[in-house]
C-alpha cells in the first residue's frame, strides 16, 4: 500500500513538473525578441525536458518539398539553414509525411535514418525520438531529441514531446509568418529606395542636356541678329523653345518631388490668381494643345493659397493626360469655381473616361489602363500631380465628366473664403 502511494506521488510530481515546464516554455517563447532566440528556446527547452543530449528542429519549406535545419544545440550550427532533408525521406521527412512520431532505439542499424551531409551526427546520435509540429491541420516542422547513449524512449516520453510540439506549433508558425512579413517589408523598402535612386539619377542626367540645349538656343538667338536687330520669327522661336526647356526643368523637379517627398522643404503658400495660372499654362502648352479645343470657364479672378510653380505643374500634368486620352478635335474644358469656401480647378475631356474601379488606381505610380488599348506615357504624371498637390494641402481626384469622358478636380484653400 505504501509503495503504491509512493508511486502515485512520484507520478503526480512528474506531471506537475511537466506542466510547469510547458508553462515556462510557452512564457519564454512568447517573449522571445527574435526568430533565432525563439528557436533557441525551443531546442534548449526540449533537450532539457526529455533529458536528452541533442535537440534539433526542422522547418518544412513553404513548397513542402524539404525540411531545413532551423535550430540545433548539439549538431554543427554552421549547417543551420543549409542542411536539408527531403520530404518523406530520413526520419524527419517520414515523420512530416506520416504526421506520426517515430522512436529509433539505434539509428546506426536503422535503414530509414538519413545521414545528412555536413552534419557530424555519428558523434552525437545513438537513439532518437521525432515528432511532427502541426498547426491548422498543416505540418510546419519536425522536432527531434537524440541521445549519445542508446536509449529506449517510453510512451510517456513520446507523449511529453508531442505535448511540447503541440504547444510550440502555433508559436513557431506565427513567429515564422511575422519574420516573413518583416522580410517582405524590408524588401519593399529596399525596392522603393532603389526606385527613388534610379529616378534621381535619370533626372540628374536630364539636367545636363537641358543646360546644353538652353546654351545653344542662346547662341542661336545671338547668331540671327543683324544691324536692325534679331529676325522676328527666330526671336519668337527662341522664346517658345526656351519656355519648353524651362517646362522640362519643372518636369524634372516634379518627378523628383513625387518620389522623394521627404526631402521637400516646407512650402511658402501665398495667394495666387488661379485664372492667371490657367491662362499662362495654356499659352505655354499651345503646341501640345493645338489639336484640341480648350475652353476656360467659371469664376474669373479666383485666388487660392498655393505655390505657383507647383500649381502650374499640376495643371500641365492634367492637360497632358487629357491630350493623351481625348481624340483630336474634341474639347478640353478647364473650370475654376468656389464651393463652400473651397476653390476647385478641374480639367475635363471627351475621351473614353475612367472606370470606377480605376479612379484611384490611376494615381498610383506607373499605373496605365492597358486593357483599354489606350495606355500611353510613363504612368507617372497623375501620381506626380497628386503628390505635388498634397505638398500644398490640396486634394486631387477623378470623376466622370458631364456627357462622358473624365474630369480631374483639384481642391485648394481659397485665399478669401466667401
Image: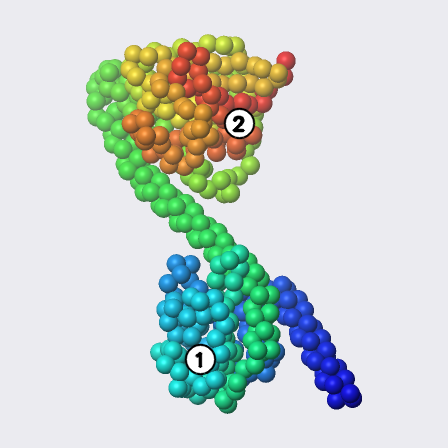
Residue drawn at the location 43% of the way across and 32% of the way down: 361
Pointer 1: residues within 10 angstroms few (<14), some, or many (20+)?
Answer: some
Q: Nearer the viewer, residue 330 or 158?
A: 158
Question: Helix, strand, or loop for circle 2?
Answer: strand
Rendered position, 213 above or below 74: above
Q: Is residue 368 visible?
A: yes
Residue drawn at the location 44% of the way across and 12% of the way down: 402
Measured from the top left, where is residue 360 in percent x and y? 46, 30
Q: Is residue 6 visible?
A: no
Residue drawn at the location 58% of the way across and 62% of the way down: 171
Number of marks present in the image shown: 2
Side of 21 where 383 appears, left or right = left
Side of 71 where 46 appears, left or right = right
Residue drawn at the location 71% of the way across and 75% of the way down: 16
CA separation, marks 1 and 2? 59 Å
Of pointers 1 and 2, the one earlier in the residue sequence = 1
Measured from the top left, where is residue 177 in percent x and y? 51, 56
Measured from the top left, where is residue 7 in percent x and y? 72, 85
Q: Which mark is residue 395?
A: 2
Measured from the top left, where is residue 78 in percent x and y? 43, 76
Q: Nearer the viewer, residue 367 or 116?
A: 116
Rendered position, 294 above or below 14: above
Quarter holding residue 339: top right
In the rendered image, which residue does mark 1 sit on?
76
Amino acid at each position: 500500500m505504501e509503495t503504491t502511494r509512493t508511486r502515485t506521488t512520484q507520478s503526480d510530481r512528474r506531471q506537475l513538473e511537466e506542466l510547469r515546464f510547458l508553462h515556462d516554455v510557452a512564457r519564454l517563447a512568447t517573449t522571445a525578441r527574435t526568430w533565432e532566440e525563439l528557436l533557441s528556446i525551443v531546442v534548449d527547452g526540449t533537450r532539457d525536458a526529455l533529458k536528452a543530449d541533442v535537440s534539433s528542429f526542422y522547418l518544412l519549406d513553404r513548397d513542402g518539398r524539404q525540411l531545413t535545419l532551423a535550430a540545433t544545440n548539439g549538431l554543427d550550427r554552421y549547417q543551420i539553414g543549409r542542411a536539408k532533408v527531403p520530404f518523406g525521406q530520413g526520419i524527419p521527412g517520414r515523420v512530416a509525411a506520416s504526421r506520426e512520431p517515430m522512436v529509433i532505439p539505434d539509428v546506426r542499424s536503422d535503414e530509414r535514418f538519413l545521414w545528412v551531409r555536413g552534419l557530424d551526427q555519428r558523434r552525437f546520435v545513438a537513439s532518437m525520438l521525432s515528432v511532427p509540429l502541426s498547426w491548422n491541420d498543416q505540418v510546419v516542422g519536425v522536432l527531434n531529441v537524440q541521445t549519445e547513449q542508446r536509449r529506449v524512449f517510453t510512451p510517456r516520453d513520446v507523449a511529453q514531446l508531442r505535448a511540447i510540439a503541440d504547444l510550440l506549433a502555433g508559436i513557431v508558425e506565427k513567429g515564422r509568418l511575422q519574420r516573413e512579413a518583416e522580410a517582405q517589408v524590408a524588401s519593399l523598402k529596399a525596392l522603393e529606395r532603389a526606385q527613388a535612386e534610379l529616378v534621381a539619377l535619370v533626372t540628374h542626367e536630364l539636367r545636363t542636356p537641358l543646360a546644353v540645349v538652353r546654351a545653344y538656343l542662346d547662341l542661336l538667338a545671338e547668331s540671327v541678329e543683324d544691324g536692325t536687330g534679331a529676325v522676328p520669327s527666330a526671336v519668337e522661336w527662341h522664346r517658345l523653345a526656351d519656355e519648353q526647356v524651362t517646362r522640362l526643368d519643372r518636369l524634372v523637379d516634379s518627378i523628383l518631388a513625387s518620389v522623394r517627398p521627404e526631402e521637400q522643404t516646407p512650402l511658402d503658400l501665398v495667394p495666387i490668381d488661379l485664372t492667371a495660372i490657367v491662362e499662362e499654362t495654356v499659352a505655354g502648352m499651345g503646341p501640345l494643345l493645338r489639336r484640341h479645343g480648350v475652353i476656360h470657364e467659371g469664376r474669373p479672378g479666383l485666388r487660392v493659397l498655393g505655390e505657383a510653380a507647383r500649381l502650374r505643374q499640376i495643371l500641365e500634368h492634367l492637360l497632358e493626360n487629357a491630350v493623351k486620352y481625348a481624340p483630336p478635335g474634341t474639347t478640353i474644358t478647364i473650370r475654376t469655381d468656389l464651393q463652400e469656401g473651397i476653390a476647385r480647378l478641374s480639367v475635363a475631356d471627351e475621351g473614353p473616361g475612367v472606370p470606377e474601379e480605376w479612379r484611384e488606381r490611376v494615381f498610383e505610380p506607373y499605373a496605365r489602363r492597358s486593357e483599354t488599348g489606350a495606355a500611353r506615357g510613363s504612368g507617372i504624371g497623375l501620381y506626380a500631380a497628386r503628390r505635388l498637390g498634397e505638398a500644398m494641402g490640396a486634394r486631387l481626384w477623378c470623376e466622370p465628366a458631364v456627357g462622358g469622358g473624365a474630369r480631374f478636380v483639384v481642391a485648394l484653400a481659397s485665399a478669401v473664403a466667401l
